[in-house]
């Protein structure tokens, strides 16, 4: 089947394009990109004014929870959430039950993704067996089965020597090591950012230095090994400083920031609802200076990617005392509205930079297809509606879990449609696009 | 402190006659007028303790559940006596919580109690914010009897009541609070109450036990006990938990006492009629020397006695005060 997307603005920074073009989709691939393309027997899709066609967004940090925690999310519900949020692909973390530390689990996840047949799924394997931090996991096997990176996410890699070995070993395949940066002793049993709000609410706090120590360790070992090191869900200004310094020194380091860390601060723990467990995540919501630093890093190019750290939890698990609630919030269906509202419309970045953060760079870091609207590339396309008024409603999320601190928020900018391999898997009727 | 201060808040009529909230979650939610109302009401309640028959019918027909997830002798007993003196029907539930054995959730426990229509739930819990959680799901009035490291509002109210009894007003007094500032819910409630009522609050302890950004609470923070107690009208000691040594917050209890212990020598730096307070339970020879605790300036047992009157006032006001009494 052929589709001709006609007369839309396309933003394709990988090819240096920001302008009105037609896109001809033939089957699963982009056949042609150009002005006034002939219809050539294709179904013509007129792109309504104001919509923007982008290479498919890739969320490089999600928790799909399957196998083992299907009450929170499954590969099917998680990828349904992804396409509704404008993501054509997601990379899923290995802290499932059992841990994705061998090819069987990797294959299981990919089978589930094939059954669901929604967003593409790129599994990320564990660094160590059981993510226990003792022995290396079956990294080559997992890579052959489809893993694109390794991490012990949820926790940092236990020891410096193991992180060094992981960087060396994964470096042989050109796979990045993704690190949850944190010094465990400085974290202790903290549940919030160490600062005024944690102090006044009587919550145990972890300082930004807790994360930055992990970043410093990682960049030193990345320098030592020459391998690629990626900082997951960066939140502290001291971490950003370490990343900038390392990049200047030529170390292969990249980093991602989650929308909640460029939007919220630890003030959200106290108001509007004190002790709302949907403000609890790790790393925690930090003070204004940290949030502002993340915005600066996004503007000046120091930050490579926006990733959601989509972490679904059942409401039973969140409806408890703050210190007993699990860390994490869902993010797949709020990332695009928050990025458009807080970054683009706030005047911090241009749309093309947003596409780099959500598409071009994640594809490059993980070395996966996508990130471009080039002829011949898979027709993974996200069409956004930058001026659409969006109201976030937790109850309406496609994710199996509804744990978001953004319930009721009104934002400017949303998703119009999501195409994976040429198939329209999400269409927002409000935007009057017909696919 | 200030000789110009002529406002004697004890003599003023309270500007409000009821509390706005159905709950007492913390001092944070109270206005200065509401604090004054509670303290004035406690004045009246205190008189009841001196009667031969120490009982009034104010809370007759009301059911109060004392739900305690942490061991407590003083606070639980004090609430229970207060409830009985007001003729409430009381029920004590003590639940040992274990992180290993997971039982019913707090929310479910509360909903089950709620189904039996109690009027008030007095909650003590090891998690900060536990009362906020209950307040969102219960219609009953929730009274915070201490939640984690967050607040212990009735303790701060009874401390204020005790200070006001002696000093007539809180405004302008220098109050030094010394001890484990990081983990203390008593500290947080006292800072909120005392600063709101115009006292000058100094907090003192080792930097390892100092909360982040403590100065944003409107207090002067120091690790010099001499600076903290010099010219102090009130000195409040906080309990040092023995297990803090294992967390490497300080080297030894002996060293803690040498650097931060309240001794007679240090007390001489304070005003001549200084009040020595402690929320209990005390570690003699750690945060306070026995000579000070048992000495003439100590009001530690007055605090305990006043606790009953203050809790009666809180229960009475949350039950609707005079309005409820007339209806009954």
Image (tube, coloured by chain):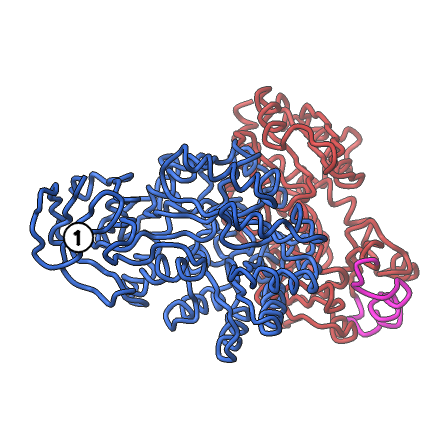
Chain colours: A blue, B red
Foreground residue among B173 and B146: B146
Question: Which segment did they paint magenta?
Answer: B246-273
Residue A377: x and y in percent read 28, 54
Residue A157: x and y in percent read 65, 57
Question: What residue do we see at 16% from left, 63% from top?
Answer: A19
Could you tell me which secondary element the residue under label 1 belongs to?
strand
Does residue A43 appear left or right of residue B137 in this picture? left
Dividing the picture into quadrants, the one containing residue A76 is top left
Q: Quadrant of the N terminus of chain A?
A: top left
Foreground residue among A310 and B235: A310
Question: What residue do we see at 29% from left, 39% from top?
Answer: A425
Mark 1 belongs to chain: A
Classed neighbour count for the residue bearing mark 1: other residues with Cα under 10 Å, few (<14), some (14–19), many (≥20): many
Dividing the picture into quadrants, the one containing residue B7 is bottom right
Dividing the picture into quadrants, the one containing residue B98 is top right
From where the camera sits, is residue A381 visible? yes
Foreground residue among A114 and A306: A114
Residue at the bottom extreme? Answer: A249
The question of residue A268 being in magenta is answered with no
Question: What residue do we see at 32% from left, 61% from top?
Answer: A354
Q: Quadrant of the C terminus of chain A?
A: top left
Does residue B95 appear left or right of residue A170 in this picture? right
Residue B314: x and y in percent read 62, 39
Q: Name the residue beneath numbered marker 1.
A: A23
Foreground residue among B116 and A303: A303
From where the camera sits, is residue B321 visible? no
Using the image, determine if residue B157 lies above or below residue A248.
above
């Amino acid at each position: 089947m052929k589709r001709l997307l006609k007369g839309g603005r396309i933003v394709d920074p990988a090819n240096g394009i920001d302008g009105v073009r037609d896109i001809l989709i033939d089957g699963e691939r982009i056949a042609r990109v150009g002005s006034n393309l002939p219809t050539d027997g294709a179904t013509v899709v007129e792109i309504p004014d104001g919509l923007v066609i982008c290479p498919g967004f890739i969320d490089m940090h999600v928790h799909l929870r399957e196998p083992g925690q299907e009450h929170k999310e499954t590969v099917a519900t998680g990828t349904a959430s992804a396409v509704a949020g404008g993501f054509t692909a997601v990379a899923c973390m290995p802290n499932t039950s059992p841990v994705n530390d061998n090819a069987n689990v990797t294959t299981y996840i990919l089978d589930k993704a094939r059954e669901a047949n929604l967003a593409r799924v790129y599994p990320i394997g564990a660094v160590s067996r059981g993510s226990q931090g003792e022995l290396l996991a079956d990294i080559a096997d997992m890579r052959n089965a489809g893993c694109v990176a390794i991490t012990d996410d949820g926790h940092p890699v236990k020891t410096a020597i193991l992180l060094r070995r992981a960087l060396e070993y994964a470096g042989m395949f050109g796979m990045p090591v993704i690190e949850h940066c944190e010094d465990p002793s400085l974290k202790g049993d903290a549940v919030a950012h160490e600062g005024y709000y944690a102090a006044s609410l009587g919550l145990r706090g972890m300082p930004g230095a807790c994360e930055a120590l992990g970043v410093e360790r990682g960049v030193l070992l990345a320098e030592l090994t020459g391998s690629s090191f990626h900082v997951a869900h960066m939140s502290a200004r001291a971490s950003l400083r370490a990343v900038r310094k390392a990049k200047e020194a030529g170390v292969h380091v990249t980093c991602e920031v989650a929308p909640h860390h460029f939007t919220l601060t630890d003030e959200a723990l106290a108001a509007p609802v004190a002790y709302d467990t949907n403000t609890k995540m790790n790393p925690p919501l930090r003070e204004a200076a940290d949030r502002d630093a993340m915005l600066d890093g996004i503007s000046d190019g120091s930050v490579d990617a926006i990733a959601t750290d989509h972490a679904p939890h059942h409401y039973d698990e969140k409806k408890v005392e703050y210190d007993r609630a699990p860390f994490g919030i869902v993010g797949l269906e709020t990332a695009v509205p928050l990025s458009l509202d807080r970054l683009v419309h706030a005047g911090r970045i241009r749309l093309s930079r947003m596409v780099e953060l959500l598409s071009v760079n994640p594809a490059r870091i993980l070395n996966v297809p996508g990130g471009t609207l080039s002829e011949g590339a898979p027709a993974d396309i996200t069409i956004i509606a930058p001026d659409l008024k969006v109201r976030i409603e937790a109850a309406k999320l496609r994710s199996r879990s509804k744990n978001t601190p953004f319930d009721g928020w009104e934002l400017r900018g949303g998703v119009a449609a999501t195409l994976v391999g040429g198939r329209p898997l999400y269409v927002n009727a409000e935007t009057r696009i017909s696919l | 402190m200030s000789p110009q201060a002529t406002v004697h808040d004890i003599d003023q009529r309270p500007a409000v006659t009821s509390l706005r909230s159905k709950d007492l979650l913390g001092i944070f939610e109270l206005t200065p007028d509401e604090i004054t109302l509670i303290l004035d009401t406690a004045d009246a309640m205190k008189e009841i303790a001196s009667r031969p028959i120490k009982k009034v019918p104010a809370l007759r027909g009301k059911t109060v559940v004392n739900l305690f997830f942490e061991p407590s002798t003083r606070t639980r007993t004090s609430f229970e006596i207060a409830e009985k003196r007001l003729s409430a029907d009381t029920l004590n539930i003590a639940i040992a919580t274990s992180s290993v054995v997971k039982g019913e959730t707090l929310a479910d426990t509360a909903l089950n109690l709620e189904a039996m229509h109690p009027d008030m739930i007095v909650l003590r819990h090891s998690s900060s914010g536990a009362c906020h959680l209950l307040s969102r799901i219960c219609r009953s009035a929730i009274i915070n009897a201490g939640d984690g490291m967050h607040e212990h509002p009735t303790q701060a109210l009874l401390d204020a009541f005790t200070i006001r009894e002696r000093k007539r007003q809180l405004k302008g007094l220098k109050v030094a609070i010394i001890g484990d500032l990081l983990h203390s819910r008593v500290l947080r409630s006292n800072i909120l109450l005392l600063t709101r009522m115009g006292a000058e609050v100094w907090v003192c302890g080792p930097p390892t036990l100092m909360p982040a950004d403590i100065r944003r609470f409107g207090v002067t923070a120091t690790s010099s006990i001499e600076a903290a107690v010099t010219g102090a009208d009130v000195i409040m000691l906080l309990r040092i938990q023995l297990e803090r040594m294992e967390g490497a917050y300080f080297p030894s209890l002996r060293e803690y006492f040498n650097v931060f212990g309240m001794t007679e020598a240090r007390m001489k730096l304070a005003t001549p009629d200084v009040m020595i307070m402690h929320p209990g339970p005390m570690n003699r020879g750690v945060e306070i020397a026995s000579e000070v605790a048992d000495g003439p300036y100590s009001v530690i047992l007055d605090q305990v006695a006043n606790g009953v009157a203050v809790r009666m006032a809180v229960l009475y006001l949350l039950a609707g005060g005079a309005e409820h009494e007339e209806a009954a």
